[in-house]
Image (cartoon, rainbow, N blue to C red):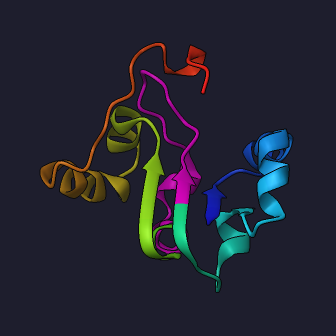
C-alpha cells in the first residue's frame, strides 16, 4: 500500500503516527507525489489535505502532470481522501475527475464528527 500526499509537511505528520511506523515494516510506503514518480503499489491512498470554504486547493493540485503521477500509481485500487467541494472548486484538473467519480457513485461523505471517532 502507498500513501501519497502533495506536501512534505503533511508527510511529516503522517510519519509521526506510531501506527504508520509499524505498518512501514510491512511494506507501507508514505511519500510525496514527486517522490512516488516511477513507482506503483497495488493500492494507493491519495490524501489531498486542503479543505476550506473558499475552494482554494493550492497550485500543486492544479498541476496536470503532478496529479497524473498521483492518480496513476495504483495498480488495483485508488482511494482519494479530500474535500470534494474544495477540490472541485479549486482545481480545474481535479474537477472532471471528481465529477466522473461522483457520477459513478464513488463518493462517500464522512460524518461531521469523523475526526473525533476513535477506531
42 left or right of 28?
left
Region rendered in magenta: 45-69
On the image, the x and y values in percent for residue 80 come to 44, 52
Q: In this rendering, is residue 75 above or below 33?
A: below
Residue 73, above or below 102: below
Q: Which residue is painted at 70% across and 50% down in the image? A: 7
For the N terminus, the quadrant is bottom right
- Number of marks in the image? 0
Name the foreground residue: 117 vs 78. Answer: 117
Instruction: Name the residue rendered at 28%, 52% in the picture.
Output: 98
Vertical side of 93 occupied by 88: above or below: above
Is residue 66 located in the magenta-colored stretch of the structure? yes
Residue 37 horizontal/vertical position (percent):
65, 79
Which residue sits furthest left? 103
Split into 4 quadrants, where in the image is the C terminus?
Answer: top right
Q: Is residue 2 above or below residue 108?
A: below
- Most foreground residue, 116 or 26: 26
Let me know if residue 27 is in the magenta part: no
Residue 108 percent location from the top left of the image:
31, 38
Q: Please name the residue shown 58% across and 39% down the image.
A: 49
Describe residue 4's horizontal placement relative to residue 109 as left or right.
Answer: right
The residue closer to the viewer here, 95 or 109, is 109
Identify the residue shown where x is 46% and y is 68%: 71
Percent across and percent down for residue 66 are 55, 69
Amino acid at each position: 500500500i502507498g500513501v501519497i500526499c502533495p506536501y512534505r509537511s503533511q508527510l511529516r505528520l503522517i510519519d509521526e503516527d506510531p501506527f504508520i511506523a509499524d505498518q512501514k515494516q510491512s511494506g507501507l510506503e508514505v511519500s510525496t507525489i514527486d517522490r512516488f514518480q516511477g513507482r506503483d503499489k497495488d493500492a494507493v491512498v491519495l490524501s489531498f489535505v486542503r479543505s476550506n470554504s473558499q475552494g482554494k486547493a493550492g497550485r500543486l493540485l492544479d498541476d496536470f502532470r503532478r496529479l497524473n503521477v498521483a492518480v496513476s500509481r495504483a495498480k488495483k485500487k485508488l482511494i482519494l481522501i479530500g474535500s470534494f467541494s474544495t477540490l472541485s472548486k479549486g482545481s480545474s484538473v481535479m474537477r472532471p475527475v471528481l465529477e466522473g467519480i461522483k457520477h459513478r457513485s464513488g463518493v462517500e461523505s464522512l460524518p461531521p464528527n469523523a475526526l473525533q471517532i476513535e477506531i
